[in-house]
Amino acid sequence: GTPASHSDTSVTLTIDGRKITVPEGTSVMRAAAESGGDIPKLCATDNVSAYGSCRLCLVEIEGRRGTPASCTTPVADGMVVKTQTPRLAKLRRGVMELYISDHPLDCLTCSANNDCELQDQAAAVGLRDVRYGYEGENHMGNKPDVSNPYFLFAPDKCIVCSRCVRACDEVQGTFALTVDGRGFGSQISAGQTSDDFLSSDCVSCGACVQACPTSALMEKSVKDMGKPERSVVTTCAYCGVGCTFRAE
Ligand code: FES
């Protein structure tokens, strides 16, 4: 969901009929996960700050208008939250439909097939049909950036959730990535003064690749040889920071 809160003050709320007590400052999304619930999401993760951009995680909160994003809404004492209602299901399907309408439909030949959060979440919200034409032509001029020796960036697969930007900033502390433009024209960019990853401030740590929920950022070895069948989690001793990696 979202990073843990470490406050000493506790808050008790009700989520889908379940009472849960969590530290003050916890997001509704994290509280829901800790109570055994599962709210659809694309832009939130456990280790980077919430951003609230994908709008899949909308919930209903008694006494509040609208449907706030659960990843950016902090819990409050006595709050009563619903995460699964017909209205929310319809909203989430609508949001997902827009994502898929702007995404290549090449799942069967995509290297991320069966290991893609966009694919998983589309199934989770029950999206069966897309009513809009594919707008991906907007990205066709944006050829994949293959300048980095270890990974590539394919703009047409990018949903601009900014998980890579936040991972670069908050996990790695490099600040090499940014979001350029608005709406359909928005895209991830490797710095403002360089055209590609290789000539940017990127240090090839791979935090962005790990964070990407689609195959927009993908290791070249995975692209060439497919997903490994086995992996181990290890701690890198290179610089002493103690980053944990999945080694494949
Ligand atoms: Fe909350 Fe994306 S997960 S808006």
Image: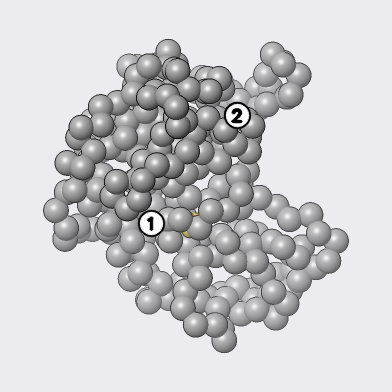
**Residue 193's x, y, as percent?**
44, 27
Task: Identify the secondary structure beneath mark 1.
Answer: helix
Which of the labelled discs sits on residue 13, or is there none?
Answer: none
> What residue appears at the point 35 percent right and 50 percent down from the top-left corner?
182
| Residue sitting farthest toward the bottom | 63
CA neighbours of label 2 inside 10 A, class few (<14), some (14 to 19), many (20+): some
Q: Is residue 61 above or below residue 6?
A: below
Between 197 and 44, the residue placed more toward the observer is: 197
Between 93 and 153, the residue placed more toward the observer is: 153
Q: Relative to 198, is 10 on the left or the right?
A: right
| Residue sitting farthest toward the right | 8
Q: Residue 175: which quarter of the image? A: top right
**Residue 177's x, y, as percent?**
49, 34
Q: Which residue position is annotated with label 2?
A: 174
Question: In this view of the protein, can residue 216 be seen by the observer?
Answer: yes
**Residue 133's x, y, as percent?**
14, 53
* Callout count: 2
Question: Residue type at mark 1?
Answer: Ala
> What residue appears at the point 30 percent right and 64 percent down from the top-left corner?
94
Q: Which residue position is annotated with label 1?
A: 124
Q: Is residue 220 above or below residue 73?
A: above
Instruction: Tell us which disc is closer to us: 1 or 2.
Output: 2
Ligand 1 is within 8 Å of the C-beta of the residue at disc 1: no
Image colouring = one colour
Question: Residue type at mark 2?
Answer: Thr
Task: Identify the secondary structure beneath mark 2.
Answer: loop
Question: In this view of the protein, can residue 227 be seen by the observer?
Answer: no
Between 88 and 138, the residue placed more toward the observer is: 138
Q: Relative to 200, is 153 on the left or the right?
A: left
Upstream in sequence: badge 1 or badge 2: 1
> What residue appears at the point 34 percent right and 19 percent down from the top-left corner?
146
- Cα–Cα span, label 1 and label 2: 34 Å
